[in-house]
Image (tube, rainbow, N blue to C red):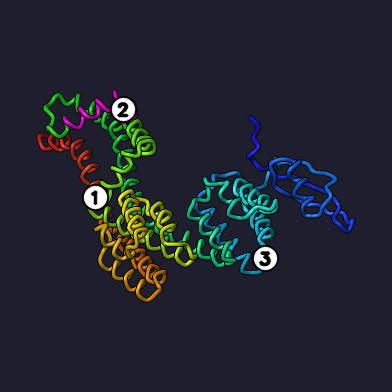
Amino acid sequence: MAQAAKSVMFIWEGTNRQGKRVSGEMSGQSDALVKAVLRRQGVNPTKVKKKPQPLFGGGARKKITTKDITVFSRQLATMMSAGVPLVQAFEIVGRGHENAAMQELILGVKADVEAGGTLTDALRKRPRYFNDLYCNLVQAGEHAGILEGILHKIAIYMEKTEALKSKVKSALVYPAAVIVVAFIIVTILMIFVIPQFRELFASFGAELPALTVMIINISTWFTQYWWLLFLVIIGSVVGFFEARKRSKKFGDYLDRMSLKIPIIGLILEKSAIARFSRTLETMFSAGTPLVEAMTSVAGATGNIVFYNACMQIRDEITTGTQLQTAMRDTNLFPNMVIQMVAIGEESGAIDTMLGKVADWYEQEVDDAVEALTSLLEPMIMAFLGVVIGGLVIGMYLPIFKLGAVV
């Protein structure tokens, strides 16, 4: 099957309308398409060939991340603010990117725009990197003739959203990382250190303390069946993530249960409210109708509970219900949020009020993560002390008893 959808870089030469020789580089799916684009631009191509890939140097090909798209949005907005035409801005941003995959993506979008398509259409061809929210905002900017301003709003929105995600992840990753390190240390002790003590104690010929016997028995099992334990752990982790990815019902269950976890659930709830407010504010300021905006807002909340609430709000708004009333009917949003939305509806500045709500809850998440980290540090240290200290004490008890007898 031909890979027609993949864009590659071509080097071209030709003459313009004045008969002057010109040359350059262009991303396209084939040399024929590149020639067609050049002719539409008034260039008569005489040579078009694929750009050779360098053996050394050049941009490394890495996976495109959300951070890459965020930086791209900010760079494009900055270029347009400086008066650089859209196509030229794509060229500058694309050529300057260190990631070869990102460079190919940007220049591919540029090629589609050069071919006469809209920026929205070019982005919608790449849903893996540009979601419906992104495309809807760009479309609103193109229709209203305020693409530059919308790109700035998108950049700000993505920067704040990524910062919020990073804070929530840090709250979850830190304790998990410490537990993994503790497990590795215990594994090393069980497999390599405790068997040495077991041989030493066997030469004593005396009865061992119950704690020591228990640790030695665990170590013996560990030494023989460590592969089985690791197989179970790895299988459970892989199975968990596969089940979450493939089973919507399981994923929805996890979303609901995560909101009930002490402390963590509160952080996730505040994070969802912050994303709800920030997304709705951005779409409002872009001029997107409320009913259309709610679908994108629902997907941006990141939790099925809030997703369903947003869809309920959308359905109620369709029948003429006010946003504040629809939000209150979900029994999910705090009274402060509803009151801020009500003031915004009455004053006609709902996007401003939503922005203030988003700022407030983003700061709340930041404070909650710091508080959680401060709380977890002594708890984790105590946990490690009990586990590692218990192993050490268990191994040295027989030596202490032996010393007391002597």
The residues colored magenta run 213-232
- In depth, the one of 174 and 213 nearer the eye is 174
Circle on res. 84:
3
- 390, 93: nearer the viewer: 93
Using the rendered image of the protein, determine whether residue 381 is visible from the camera's viewpoint. no
Q: Which residue is mark 1?
A: 261
Mark nearer the N terminus (2 vs 3): 3
Is residue 226 covered in magenta?
yes
- Graded by Cα atoms within 10 Å as few (under 14), some (14 to 19) or many (20 or more), the crowding at tag 2 reads some
Q: Amino acid at mark 3?
A: Val
Q: Does residue 168 lie above or below 3 as drawn?
A: below
Marking on residue 299: none
Q: Going 57% across and 67% down the picture, which residue do you hit? A: 146
Q: Residue 44 location, x and y as percent?
A: 84, 50
Q: Nearer the viewer, mark 3 or mark 1?
A: 3
Q: Nearer the viewer, mark 2 or mark 3?
A: 3
Question: Which quarter of the picture shows residue 53?
Answer: top right
Query: Can you name the residue that lies furthest to the right here?
Result: 19
Q: Residue reaching furthest front? A: 319
Q: Is residue 296 above or below residue 85?
A: above
Residue at the disc numbered 2? 226
